[in-house]
Amino acid sequence: MHDQAVRQPQEPQNPKGSQEPLSGGLKQRHLTMLGLGGVIGAGLFVGSGAGIAVAGPGIVLSYLIAGAIAMLVMRMLGELSAAMPASGSFSVHAERALGRWAGFSVGWLYWFLLVVVLAVEATGAAKIASGWAPGVPQWAWVLVFMVVFTAANLAAVKNFGEFEFWFAALKVGAIVLFLALGALAVFGVLPDTDPVGTAHLTGDGGFFPNGASGVISGVLAVVFAFGGLEVVTIAAAETDDPARAVGRAVRSAVFRILFFYVGSMLVVVTLLPWDSMTPGLSPYVAVLDRIGIPAAGTIMNIVVFVALLSALNANLYGSSRMVFSLAERGEAPRGLLRVSPGGVPRRAVLASVAFGFGSVVLNLLWPDTVFLYMLNAVGAVLLFVWGLIAVSQLKLRPRIEREMPERLTLRMWAFPYLTWATLAAMAVVLVLMLLDASARPQLLWSAGATAVVLLVSLVRELRARRA
């Protein structure tokens, strides 16, 4: 099992994932759609307005930069996961590359990130549902969502796969339809529309109305919207052929997602003046209103609602598998290893949902104090996780080439140069966050949370050596 992998990190897991006691109920279509829909969420549909407000049309370049970083990280992670699939994904890779402290730290940080963000998603979906049924209190909607998705994750992994497949299909369909309608409106093909040309791209202060600083601020505003693709490599361990499945999912996802994000932003800033954007309000609604789509706000509310529930479901799944993998390697309580006859780590699911539900209660009771501190504490964790993925790939790629080159079915481009360039880009983003007054609290709180986890891992290492 994983204990052996800890002592002998050079040994990869079985490519078929036979070392995993989890079920193999996920199919290729589940994984492919999870890859496409995993990062299409409220951060794009609503949060992109904040990026446009600071970067103007230059938000297109901001998304290109942020998307390129995410795409390269996913290529690295896809390479490692195709060669050595594991339910702990990058946590297992970090352990093999750098030692137990790295696997412990990145695994627990990512678990904490997922269960805290889960509260944001549950609360956001409940607010939308309360608008449709004002007689039902918000906490009741939260309870319904948590119970439904807990039951789905406890029953069988194929239930998670089916939920995510249809959720992602709706989100991807909404993006494709938006791009099609937007393109028709740009060229004046739709009824009552005229070609808009480049007036909004080059007018209103130009393509970079706030200069390079605006583009940089835009990157800080949107880079975290690309988080979520990591779950694909976690889920791949529960397919019949993990190595093949993760390779296909990563290949199909990264370019299409970049196209969806950049294409959407290009449509928005072409059709509307950038300074008409209001942070917190969906630019997608503004575009649909502009081209005369009836009930645009209601339509987008439905899409955002589905996106939030999809993210909640994926985060519950990802957090349960991550803590299960930690337990397998002796980095979490062994009691979490209990698996149902159908191959579902039920105790790991319940542990994750319990902490997640606690986060929801904190969000409902003290959104501007206790929960805000927790949210800030995970604000930059994604970049720390991505950084460890890159370092792990630098360490493990030569080992795989030397010992098992046949498993390199998915290769990182221009290794090691692009890996180093990606690490440098992430370091620049962290420095920019430190210099940005609005992003600095997130970075400092996240650095504090990371330091605490690293300290715990160091204490564990010292105790293990003395034993």
Image (cartoon, helix red, strand yellow):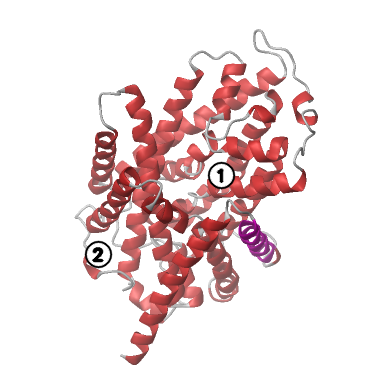
Q: Which residue is mark 2?
A: 337
Range of magenta residues: 418-435
Decide: is 168 above or below 318: above
87 vs 179, left or right, is left
Give the image quarter of residue 423: bottom right
Dot 2 surroundings within 10 Å: few (below 14), some, or many (20 or more)?
A: many
What is the secondary structure assignment of the residue under circle 1?
helix
> Nearest the camera: 376 or 306?
376
Q: Could you tell me residue 121's position as x and y percent?
A: 39, 41
Q: Which mark is residue 181?
A: none
Residue drawn at (49%, 61%), measured in percent from left and top?
446
Amino acid type of disc 2? Answer: Leu
Q: Residue at x 65, y 12 (%)?
A: 190
Frontmost residue, 124 versus 241: 124
Residue at (63% x, 54% y) in the render: 436
Residue 251's x, y, as percent? Answer: 57, 48
Q: Is residue 444 magenta?
A: no
Residue type of the residue flagged with mark 1: Ser
In which quadrant will I find the N terminus? bottom left
**Sooner in the amino-acid sequence: mark 2 or mark 1:** 1
Could you give the CA–CA distance between mark 2 and mark 1, rounded to whole angstroms?
33 Å
Q: Callout 1: few (<14), some (14-19), or many (20+) C-alpha neighbours within 10 Å?
A: some
